[in-house]
Amino acid sequence: MSTPILGLVMILIMFGMLALRQPVWLALAACGITGNVVMSNINVAAFVAGTGTFDTASSYGLSVIPLFVLMGEVATSSRLSSELFKSARVVLSGVRGGLSVATIAASGAFGAICGSSVATAATMTRIALPEMREAGYEDGFSAASVAAGGTLGILIPPSIILVIYGSIAEQSVPRLFAASMIPGIVLLLLYAVTALVIAARTPGKVPIDSAASFIERLSALRGPWQFIVLFTVTIGGIYAGVFSPNEAAAIGAFGAIVLGFLSRRLTLLGLFEAVRASVITSCVLFMIIIGATIFAQFIVQTRLPDLLLNAATAAGMAPWAVMLTIILVYLVMGCFLEGIGMVLITVPVFLPIVIGYGYDPVWFGVVVVVVVELGLITPPVGMNLFIIQAQARDVAIGQLYRGIIPFLVAPVLLLVLLFAMPQLVLWLPDLLY
């Protein structure tokens, strides 16, 4: 059996294991180790597995992950997300659909210090969904607003997925953060416009809140000052070149703890729970990364990416056709995989093909994140949809499906913009770095 065919067989076996509900890290590691045994011998497989595990666990670049996870957990324990939502609600009061827009805006802001879509969706479900129900919003529209806003957590920096992508693709994390900023803001605005259009077309399902005064709106802007401080210090410090991503994550995590205690919203028990949750989450992530590292090293040795690139070139496929095929693969994978697993499995295979067709790897990283976001809210299987439904069991899944469909237009439109105007991604990193 030739090595490219062996690589293809192992990929199929891996997907078979995933279909049988095996853990992502186990499917990746088992297929990578088995492939190396077949291709070489057990000693080579043991060496690759050992060095891959050590290199990942000791990687300074990946130390940013547990620190950003800790910052997000502390921010959640400090109820910072509730302050963001309350401020956005007051500022947008008096607008039909204003609560939905406030949810999306607060999700985007919270995602900027959380870095996780699932955590953002879970947090905002507990905060925003009861408020929208009390205001008379229809359940499907309310839950869909939370699901859509939650996806912003992996695009607006800091983003854990972008850190992982940067490690695999050997790209600068600050450049990736800068590249995702403008698309993240554009997607937030597209979601907000979508919510306002839905509210205007179905006024019976979306009542208008009483409008706050100008003074009340101005006062509400002072509410999320902790978020402003954290975001300015962490992301602003990275963009200004004052901190590396690792230093910014450490300062951000420490700052979140200090601000939590100063505001008397964080207790010692809350800090302990935040650290505990961060350790568990980080361990899960690192197990997946270790498995992906072993699998990626095997795939590179099989030269399967080179074979696929040569096949696409020989078939005369246009660059846009190749990218469309890759995007469709991501959408299908989104039916049974979460975002980090998708990135770790696919990037070692797809990235050489994308670069071979002349696309920028930083631009491709942002495209991957947008497609992953789309998968998180695409029926019938979307991680954010199930996270919300698990916490709001009285919301019928059919209602949630119907509510989310109009919001799918926003990420699709953003993808079109990214292809039509690549500088939407590349302008800021080229300016800063």
Image (spheres, helix red, strand yellow):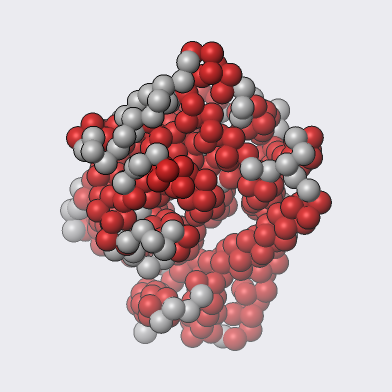
Tell me the quarter of the image containing the N terminus.
Answer: bottom left
Tell me the quarter of the image containing the C terminus.
Answer: top right
Residue 291 vs residue 355, the one in the foreground: 291
Does 315 sit above or below residue 146? below
Left or right of 411 in this view: 430: right
Question: Where's residue 430, x and y in %?
Answer: 49, 27
Residue 232: quarter of image: top right
Residue 311 vs residue 86, the one in the foreground: 86
Does 78 sit above or below residue 24? above
Q: Residue at x 33, y 30 (%)?
A: 208
Does residue 284 appear anywhere in the picture?
yes
Question: Where's residue 295, x and y in %?
Answer: 51, 70
Residue 284 vs residue 363, the one in the foreground: 284
Farthest top residue in view: 214
Does 298 sit above or below residue 69? below
Q: Residue at x 65, y 27 (%)?
A: 225
Left or right of 54 in this view: 373: left
Does residue 63 appear anywhere in the picture?
no
Q: Residue at x 30, y 37 (%)?
A: 206
Question: Where's residue 17, x and y in %?
Answer: 43, 80
How many badges with numbers are in the image? Answer: 0
Question: Where's residue 348, x and y in %?
Answer: 45, 60
